[in-house]
Amino acid sequence: MNENHDAFDNYVLKFDMNERMIAYKYNHSYRVVHQAEEICRSLELDTYERDIASLIALLHDIARFRQWTDYKTFNDHESFDHGDEGVKILFDEGEIKNYQVSKEEHEVIKKAIKNHNKLKLDTTNMNEREKMHSMIIRDADKIDIIYSFSTNRLLELDEDEEEISEKIKEDFFNHLDVLKTDIKNKNDKIIMLIALVFDLNYDYSKERILNEKYLNNMYNHLKHKKIFKPYIDEAIRYLKGEK
């Protein structure tokens, strides 16, 4: 699938690779490709399905480059929904024609990219294969987001001395998604990040985060450890399948 990598690189090179966040999203895309392929291997999927999952992973954040260039943010609420915009770039503007994939696969790619960033995966109008590819990209993306915040070489954790908001605390310990609309301070945002583990679909994803000690490494970078320790501990218990 090197032709698809070349097509993606040609698209990204239209943007300023000297911009740190443009370069970050470029590298993030390829790391997510790797994680998607590893999930496929864990599921014992054939080469064809791995290639589709790989292409979805390569393209899942294609709208991020335009988003940062135009708005200097990755906050969808301050710009546009990057899953929806990715579908627009690929299928309405025709970028997908530059990639080696049959038209029969457009629908599964479209649904997976549109849904990769949504709070919950809506499977109402999905068949089992579309659901599987949507779950693969959601997991692969979350693995790399958590990894990226586990090392200051990629993304830094922005914290303060505020206690975690009560609604955020309640939802987290009930293993629920943390809503952006409930966030009151910088520390709440970090809890939202840790809570990504509650939406993982596959054993590989949980094991990867555990075995590579991403949450432990994240904790080591935090200054106000007393605030975050109960949340890191609970997330690790969840990943281990402990009550």
Image (cartoon, rainbow, N blue to C red):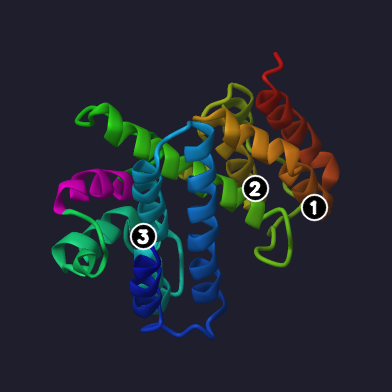
- Can you tell which of label 3 and label 1 is closer to the viewer? 3
Q: What residue is drawn where x is 48% and y is 55%?
A: 33
Distance in Å between CA atoms under marks 2 and 3: 26 Å
Q: Earlier in the sequence, mark 2 or mark 1?
A: 2
Q: Could you say which is closer to the camera, residue 160 or residue 66?
A: 66
Q: Which residue lies furthest to the top in this view?
A: 243
Residue 105 lies within the magenta run: yes
The span picked out in magenta is 103-114
Q: In which quarter of the image is the N terminus?
A: bottom left
Q: Residue furthest front?
A: 47
Q: Residues within 10 Å of mark 2 (few under 14, many from 20)?
A: many
Image location of residue 219, percent across then percent down: 79, 46
Q: What residue is drawn where x is 34% and y is 58%?
A: 82
Q: What residue is drawn where x is 38% and y is 74%?
A: 6
Q: Quadrant of the C terminus?
A: top right
Image location of residue 106, percent across then percent down: 19, 50
Q: Residues within 10 Å of mark 3 (few under 14, many from 20)?
A: many
Residue highlighted by disc 2: 190
Image location of residue 25, percent across then percent down: 50, 67
Asked which secondary structure carries label 1, the reply is loop
Q: What residue is drawn where x is 84% and y is 45%?
A: 225
